[in-house]
Image: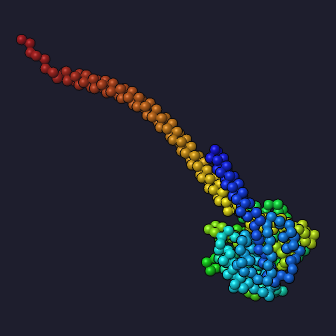
Amino acid sequence: MKSRLVLAGIVSLLLLISFASSITANPQPLIVVYGKGMLEPDTSLKYMMGNITDVKWKLLTESLTYDDLKGAKMLILVLVDTSLNYTTDELDAIKKWFDEGGKTLWVCSDSDYKGGDYLRIGPANSVLEKVGSVLRGEHTEGVDKVAPMGAPYRVGAKIDPDDPLKFLANGVSNLVLFHGPGIVIAYKDGKYMALEENVPENVYRIAWIEKGAIQEGAAPLPEVHDISYEGKLVEMAAELFPDKKNIVILSAEAPFDHYRGMWTDEYHEVTLDGARFITNVISWGVSETFWLELKVNSLEKTVSDLSSKVDSLTNQVDSLTNQVDSLTNQVKTLSDTVNTLSGKVDGMAGTVNTALGVAVLSLIIALVAVALPFVKKPATK
């Protein structure tokens, strides 16, 4: 108990030092938003940048260079104009920036809706591949069979992150709008994989369609899911890169644009928590303490696991001690029984010896009695 209190004190001190250092070093982290092809910010983006004021925003719409990214903590990529693509120079700039470490990259994919949304999937995947992420957008559309907003393509995603990202759901009690989304999958060791059951190392799921289905819009067919699939679907996930303290986020929709962004608190008379959720994601993306907290959580889990093992071993020792005590008592009981039996045997031996002596004496008397008549008397002089 005392060691745990000491550990908690050390952890708190480290977090305080880290937090104080982050405030001194960078009071307003820089977020670059690249809405390629955007003519002007939509309502969602205006509200997003207007309400999250503890960061510095930089909006780009035409091109992206490494110089644009210098000093940025986070980059959000939204391909607004589907007739465009990310250029080789832009991909190189993103990778150079990302490889510096301590970065968060949020890539927004889309569904394969044939109206043009499908053209966003390839560019998003090219960015993910460039930075070495296993996350991918699947060439299909995820729909919501419950359809709380009146149509299955108006997806109400449940924010239910895997550990250690549970904090992204803080204050999020309602669904979040993913309007006409795709599906998040992974590409690992040359194979595509669904994320509903298993995930690659360091990949964590964030948002889900609870009762989903597949709706195919444009070629090619989905890489993983069968078009008849029904069940849970992953709409947003993150991959952590502990070696460089980098984060890659992939969402099957965007926080702004894409017909209707995730930053929405009500849609078709349904209350949503898009603003709260996006705020949580942004705060996490620019956090200076996340990796320290992750390490602390890992240490606490290790301590907890070791404590559980110690408790288990203690219980085993107690059980073995009880067994030894029981065996000792049994040995004592057997020893007492042996001593009792030994006394009885000794008593029986004495009786047998007495009886044997009497029998021998009786036999001698009998033999004497038989022999006497044959003994000649001496002649009388």
Q: Is residue 63 placed above or below 280 in the rendered structure? A: below
Q: Position of residue 165 (x, y in %)?
A: 73, 63
Q: Is residue 167 placed above or below 1 in the rendered structure? A: below
Q: Quadrant of residue 40?
A: bottom right
What colouring style does the render use?
rainbow
Residue at image location 71% in from the left, 54% down from the top: 16
Q: Which of the two residues, 108 or 14, is positioned nearer the viewer here?
A: 14
Q: Which of the two residues, 275 or 229, is positioned nearer the viewer here?
A: 275
Residue at image location 69% in from the left, 85% down from the top: 88
**What residue occupies the far right of the structure in this picture?**
269
Residue at image location 6% in from the left, 11% down from the top: 381
Q: Which of the two residues, 125 or 131, is positioned nearer the viewer here?
A: 131
Q: Position of residue 335 (x, y in %)?
A: 45, 34
Q: Quadrant of the N terminus?
A: top right
Q: Position of residue 61 (x, y in %)?
A: 80, 81
**What residue occupies the far left of the structure in this picture?**
381
